[in-house]
Image: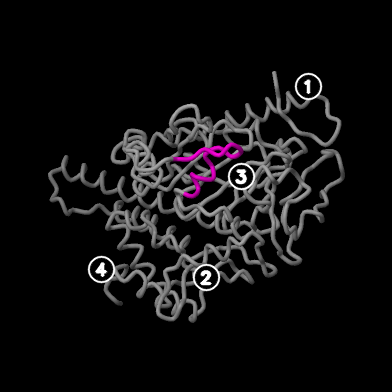
Amino acid sequence: MRVPFFLDGQVDANSLILRYLLTAAMHFVVCSQLALAHDEFERPPINYSASKPENPVSRLQAEIDRGDIVLRHDPHFGYLPDLLKKLSIPVESQMLVYSKTSLQRTQISPRTPRALYFNDQVYVGYCHTGEVLEISTADPQLGTVFYTLEQSNEEPPRVIRQMDRCLQCHGTTNTQNVPGHTIRSLYVDAGGMPILGEGTRRVDPSTPIDKRWGGWYVTGMHGEQTHLGNQVIRDRDAPHPWNNDEGQNVPDLTGRFKTSNYLTPYSDIVALLVFEHQTHVHNLLTKANFTGREALHYQEEFNRVLNEPPDHRLESTTRRIENASEKLVEGLLSVDEAPLGSPITGTSGYAEVFSKQGPRDSKGRSLRDFDLKTRVFKYPCSYLIYSPGFDALPDQVRDEVARKLRDVLDGNGGERYAHLSPEDRTAIWEILTETKPDLFQRVPAQ
């Protein structure tokens, strides 16, 4: 059995193999148990696996099939550079993770991290010696859809949709029981193996910075606040807490591994912050979509069986839509976001690339503007409000979200929204009414 570990110390090979097998077995058992949740979205009205996706990746494959575009193969990186270009994914978004916690785990270590790239809708994973590119995308009606692309150029490139093996971990309680993303922070040894005895944390915007990024490389300046990134535990028996002074305020990753095997020498801290916000809101959008459609489907069946009028509304239908909409609004408005303890600056240029995308109002303001002093965004209302996933919400859900947003921005949100100052609320309202003018059209003023 070949186990491609890359180590900086003397470790017994049999112990490594056993550790790897135990970790893989635990990973499989936990994910398999959680995967029972995905049965819910395999039934009507969602029909996840049986439904045809309509998203940037499916459209790209259709263009390839028609011969409209050619996906070029690079001798060093395979299809990665041209795929990113075709999908408009900036290389500045590169993030690097070295924990063995994904599909191609045998290819991942601190010396051969897995690279991730993303834009508003698509995520691409790359392993230096991997056989496939891993792709996921936010589909407006299906939530996260997963694909792989073979890195060999022996045959025409074909993006293949993946089902069960991805949903074992990406369609569980960790993703709110919808197809989505989950991010982990954990301690990792010199071979990239998670040290499960030290615990693992699911990361979202509420996670304190000092608990984030275990198993990830992090480049950028962040002052005196600390994080768990850039840390490799070479001696599991060393006294706790493990010192990570050398992992803080790292400008680039030169000298830590062969950075020429990657598109940039960075794993940008601002990209990581946006990534965590975006995956969280994507999951909430999918949850609100599925909950609304399922509630309305049940309502329709109830009315049909009991000969109720089509517009008859069960109290439970209203309640389910209100609850899902409330959680989405909380995510959009960064409720419970962990504060930044010091100003943050990235080093890859990602912040500049991200901010330029707009849209902007007549005063030049954008929901993509960063604060990065005490919080991530200057105007804390998610830019994903412009996304196809938001626009695809059932009318009843979208209207409820707009109503709740209007209440909050009018100052009636209560303690949950106390982090928004009057100036914040006014700015967000003005930006939204100019850049998404149809949002509040169906919601009367109070």
Image quadrant where one finds the C terminus: bottom left
Kind of residue sitting beneath label 4: Arg
Task: Evaluate whether residue 266 shows in this view.
Answer: yes
Disc 2 marks which residue? 369
Judging from the image, the colouring scheme is: one colour
C-alpha gap between disc 4 and disc 2: 28 Å
Kind of residue sitting beneath label 3: Ala
Kind of residue sitting beneath label 1: Asn
Whole-percent x, y for residue 387 in the image = 39, 58
Residue interval drawn in magenta? 71-85
Residue drawn 46% across the image and 62% down it: 330
State the residue in front, 298 or 338. 338
Kind of residue sitting beneath label 2: Asp
Whole-percent x, y for residue 202 in the image = 60, 47
Q: Residues within 10 Å of mark 4 (few under 14, many from 20)?
A: few
Question: Disc 4 or disc 1, which is closer to the eye?
Answer: 1
Does the magenta-highlighted stretch encompass residue 390?
no
Whichever of callouts 4 and 3 sits on the residue coming sooner in the sequence is: 3
Residue 302 left/right relative to 317: left
The residue at the far top in this view is 1
Height in image: 274 above or below 138? below
Disc 1 is placed on an element classified as: helix
Question: Disc 1 or disc 2, which is closer to the eye?
Answer: 2
Disc 1 marks which residue? 14
